Amino acid sequence: MSGATVNDPVAELIACRDCGQDCLLQVADLCADCIARIGTAADDADYRAWRTENERRVVTGELTGAI
């Protein structure tokens, strides 16, 4: 199905905020590869910051689309 275009917003490719790679699945603006990278890094400061920001966005409703 190479070259097909999809007009379904659920299946829309979105660029990862960190690496810029287009992907179908993101969790709070990061692709799975970037989440894995920060989650397994020797210094987990980036991962803690990402988690803290996600928690804030969930509580405020920003991440869930409530606002």
Image (cartoon, rainbow, N blue to C red):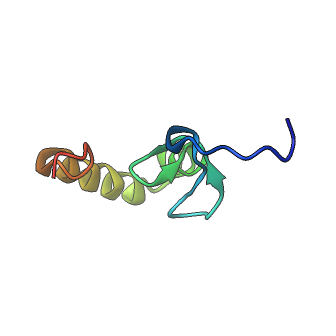
- Most extreme residue toward the right, as rendered? 2
- Most extreme residue toward the top, as rendered? 1
- Most extreme residue toward the left, as rendered? 60
At a point 27% along the width and 48% down the height, the residue shown is 63
Q: Which of the 4 image quadrants contains residue 4?
A: top right
The answer to whether 25 appears left or right of 47 in the picture is right
Q: Position of residue 50 (x, y in %)?
A: 35, 55
Name the foreground residue: 14 vs 55: 14
Q: Is residue 6 above or below residue 67?
A: above
Name the foreground residue: 2 vs 51: 2
Q: Position of residue 57 (x, y in %)?
A: 21, 52
Q: Quadrant of the N terminus?
A: top right
At a point 12% along the width and 51% down the height, the residue shown is 60
Q: What count of labels does the image hold?
A: 0
At a point 61% along the width and 64% down the height, the residue shown is 20
Name the foreground residue: 2 vs 47: 2
Q: Which of the 4 image quadrants contains residue 7?
A: top right
Q: Position of residue 52 (x, y in %)?
A: 24, 52
Name the foreground residue: 24 vs 49: 24
At a point 25% along the width and 42% down the height, the residue shown is 64
Q: Position of residue 40 (x, y in %)?
A: 53, 44
The answer to whether 33 appears left or right of 9 in the picture is right
